[in-house]
Amino acid sequence: MSDYANYLKEQNKKTKHFQSLTEPVRSIADNLDFRFLPQCEAIPSLLIELESLLREKDNFLFIVLEDVCPTDPRRKYDYLQALKSCGLAVKAAMLTYRLSNNIGNTNCVWKVPGQDPDSLCQSQQTIEIVKKQIPTFHTRAMRQSLMQKYGRVAPNKKPAVLRSLYRVLTDDSSAATNEHTAEIDERVRLILDMEDPDVVLDLRALNTGMTSSGINAKSFWKKKWEHLLMTDAMTKGCTLLEQYQQEISLSK
């Protein structure tokens, strides 16, 4: 148990360190692997579909392998290993973004001209297009920096609105810190997607009897007690109801 407790402490320390960074933990540029695939006339049967798709594509238009390869982890591993070792009949290039392990990686392939000396240069343009579509995950410190800076100049803006604005402007794909925040963020997303100004409204403003500390619920609880006492009086007689009415009359 002590070893496990020490392990949890170390993981907690690493998490706090990562969340305090002012840049994404995993840099896209440092985790890309590019290669030209070997050419092979007798390709494995599991790569025939990919071969056919690439032949129909124009040069340098990429295919995301996760859309065509097996979803089973073991079969996906065999698929990628066969592609890297055997290659395809057409000349192709492959880009891998290492997110975590072989299961979480993102892989793209595209067809290149067989004898074109500019294939590498043009492939670099394709890589830049792919990089824009790779999700980025910002740290907690990066998000808090914006909240603190713009929250001071726009104190009336709700944190959920600022979080939504941050994701739109920075393409941050990080998950919410908890289920409650995720639910609120989803509501904001739906409101913005609907683009209906009548929906973007704090319904609490329609309530009457507002106080500086929130809704004045005195009337509500008064009616609630009357209902409860009436229900109780129906089973026990009118003693409690009469007593409550006397208390109300004395308090006026």
Image (spheres, rainbow, N blue to C red):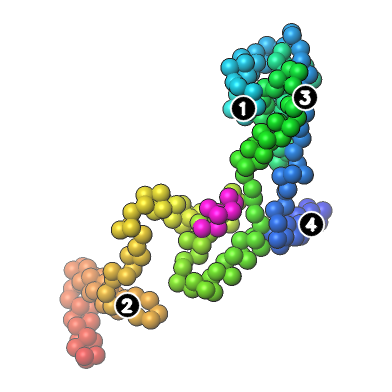
Q: Which residue is mark 2?
A: 210
Give the label, 4 or 1, closer to the camera: 1
Residue matched to label 1: 61
Answer with mark 3 or mark 1, whichever residue precedes in sequence.
1
Residue designated by label 3: 117
Element class at badge 4 = helix
Task: Pinpoint residue 146: horizontal percent, then vertical percent.
Answer: 59, 65
Q: CA distance from mark 3 to mark 1?
A: 18 Å
Image quarter for residue 7? Answer: bottom right
Quick one: SS at disc 1?
A: loop
Q: Are marks 2 and 1 in contact (CB under 8 Å)?
A: no
**Residue at mark 2 to residue at mark 4: CA–CA distance:** 48 Å
Residue 65, quarter of picture: top right
How packed is label 4: few (under 14 Cα within 10 Å), some, or many (20 or more)? few
The secondary structure type at the circle numbered 2 is strand
Residue located beneath label 4 in the image: 10
At 76% from the left edge and 12% from the top edge, which residue is drawn?
40
Picture coordinates of residue 202, whole percent (x, y): 36, 65
Q: Is residue 43 above or below residue 70?
A: above
